[in-house]
Image (spheres, helix red, strand yellow):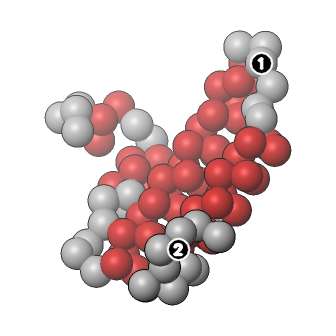
Amino acid sequence: MGKKFGKLLPRELWQELLSTYPGMEEVDIWQALFRAGTLMRNVSIPVAENLGYSYHDQEDDRVTAYLLHVMNLPKDAQSFD
């Protein structure tokens, strides 16, 4: 990670970014992944608006639903169904 991010980003945003680095437990990894998605969403929406683009909420929802589906698969699952 860039050495100066901590100095350039607002403290709250910096803390959110740091929270995307998981521990070693599976639950920590999943939580960090979903925090990264939330951080991306929270930053991307205003950036898109400022650049005259729209944020693709439906795509975001589909990705989140897919990740939740994968997270909740049985440990011995052989497919994504």
Q: Is residue 34 above or below residue 71?
A: above
* 74 sits to left or right of 75: right
Question: In the rendered view of the protein, which quadrant contains the C terminus?
Answer: bottom right
* Occupied quadrant, residue 57: top right
Foreground residue, 53 or 77?
A: 77
**Does residue 7 appear in this view?**
no
Q: Which of marks 2 and 1 precedes in the sequence?
A: 1
Q: Dot 1 surroundings within 10 Å: few (below 14), some, or many (20 or more)?
A: few
Q: Which residue is mark 2?
A: 71
Amino acid at the residue labelled 1: Tyr
Write down the residue under mark 1. Answer: 53
Query: Nearest the camera: 8 or 77?
Result: 77
> In whole angstroms, how far apart are the C-alphas of marks 1 and 2?
31 Å
Q: Name the residue rendered at 55%, 52% in the picture.
A: 37
Q: Nearer the viewer, mark 1 or mark 2?
A: 2
The amino acid beneath tag 2 is Met
SS at mark 1? loop
Judge by depth and name the residue closer to the eye, 63 or 3: 63
